């Protein structure tokens, strides 16, 4: 089964390589009647694009072009195709190491699978592919907004420095504003400063660090998810694990639940304004694979960026000899802040897809 498409009714297919001519996606198909412009997509791509002292020095404007599916500012219910040109690709920078397998990258596994590989920055395995996911996610996020659903991501942890904010007690818009005000996207300013220092230290050493991205979705309707093999949390985990550099996914209390008693972990059920509600949210808004109406809370563990300038052991696949590699060039010392809009996008795509399956989002919005 091809691996470049995701979703059932809101189906996203991405294409393009890191140092190829362009990257893009086809979304087949958002409902008709959604007001959509390139500016809607651009504001999300601007959050993901490189730039700033703590990220890659690759200078990509990431200007999106909508090629199909939108007419007179409105979706037609047909496939929306989007393209972003690679304007600052430098494939020649990889010539000196094209025969060396980079540790931590997909160089060896792509070669083992296909017998050939794109050595220009990793090709399809590069995080450059996530431009297309964010473009598709921008449509999904706008659709969620039409139904009063908020989605916000932020940096929960970098290099062992952890943000302790309680999202249940916070206005998501305020979390977003605080997170977007600093280069590490952490909503706690004191922790943001410590995180930034850790990233700078790693950068000076030619090394890298990882961390955790958290995404919260508020006002999700109960009932999303299909038993038993197509649970909402299972599909979210599948979607988020498919993002480059993600090595683990948590829903709600996640791995911390193993240190809790059942009496601690179960969320007490109460009535609020005559409706069933939950006092706590260890479940992360999902029970039995189906949304319960509470905040959907997702965390993604992001590994340290594998491209580092410290010498590492590897193999030359042309001579089949052991050697050392030093990866030079324009690489992020920490990919976590730029991963925030990517994780948001994949979670948003999942929620929209299940809302369409459930019939909450119709094929046309014109009758709403």
Image (cartoon, helix red, strand yellow):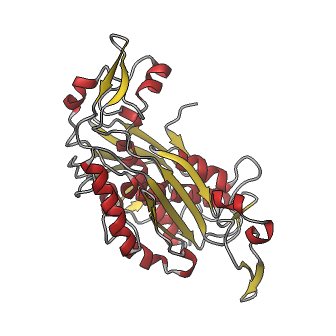
Q: Is residue 242 above or below residue 255?
A: above
Q: Nearer the viewer, residue 317 or 351?
A: 317
Report if residue 171 is visible in the image.
Answer: yes
Q: Residue lying farthest right?
A: 263
Report if residue 43 is visible in the image.
Answer: no
In the rendering, at what x and y percent does residue 234 appear? Answer: 66, 50
Residue 118 location, quadrant: top left
In the rendering, at what x and y percent does residue 238 appear? Answer: 59, 46
In the rendering, at what x and y percent does residue 294 appear? Answer: 65, 72
Q: Quadrant of the N terminus?
A: top right
Please name the residue shown 61% across and 71% down the image. Answer: 295
Residue 206 location, quadrant: top left
Please name the residue shown 51% across and 80% down the image. Answer: 170
Q: Is residue 365 above or below residue 178?
A: above
Q: Residue lying farthest top?
A: 319
Please name the residue shown 37% across and 74% down the image. Answer: 190
Q: Quadrant of the C terminus?
A: bottom right
């Amino acid at each position: 089964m091809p691996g470049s498409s995701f979703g059932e009714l809101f189906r996203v297919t991405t294409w393009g390589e890191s140092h190829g001519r362009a990257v893009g996606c086809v979304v087949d198909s958002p409902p008709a009647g959604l007001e959509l412009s390139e500016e809607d997509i651009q504001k999300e791509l601007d959050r993901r694009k490189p730039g700033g002292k703590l990220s890659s020095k690759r200078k990509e404007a990431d200007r999106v072009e909508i090629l199909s599916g939108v007419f007179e500012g409105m979706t037609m219910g047909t496939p929306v195709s989007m393209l972003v040109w690679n304007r600052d690709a430098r494939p020649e920078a990889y010539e000196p190491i094209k025969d060396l397998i980079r540790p931590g990258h997909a160089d060896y596994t792509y070669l083992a699978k296909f017998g050939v590989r794109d050595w220009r920055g990793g090709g399809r395995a590069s995080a450059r592919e996530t431009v297309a996911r964010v473009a598709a996610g921008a449509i999904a996020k706008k659709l969620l907004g039409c139904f009063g659903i908020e989605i916000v991501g932020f940096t929960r942890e970098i290099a062992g420095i952890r943000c302790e904010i309680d999202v249940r007690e916070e206005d998501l818009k305020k979390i977003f504003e605080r997170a977007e005000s600093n280069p590490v996207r952490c909503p706690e300013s004191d922790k943001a400063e410590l995180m930034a220092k850790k990233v700078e230290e790693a950068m000076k050493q030619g090394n890298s660090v990882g961390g955790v991205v958290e995404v919260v979705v508020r006002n999700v309707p109960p009932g999303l998810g299909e038993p038993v093999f197509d649970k909402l949390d299972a599909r979210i985990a599948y979607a988020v694990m498919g993002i480059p550099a993600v090595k683990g996914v948590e829903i709600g209390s996640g791995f911390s639940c193993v240190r809790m008693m059942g009496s601690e972990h179960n969320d007490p059920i109460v009535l609020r304004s005559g409706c069933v509600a939950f006092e706590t949210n260890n479940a992360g808004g999902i029970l039995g694979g189906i949304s319960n109406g509470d905040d959907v809370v997702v965390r993604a563990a992001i590994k340290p960026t594998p491209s580092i300038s410290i010498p590492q052991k590897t193999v030359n696949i042309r001579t089949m000899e052991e050697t050392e590699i030093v990866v030079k060039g324009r690489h992020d010392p920490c990919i976590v802040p730029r991963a925030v809009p990517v994780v948001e996008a994949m979670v948003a795509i999942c929620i929209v897809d299940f809302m369409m399956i459930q019939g909450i989002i119709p094929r046309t919005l014109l009758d709403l």
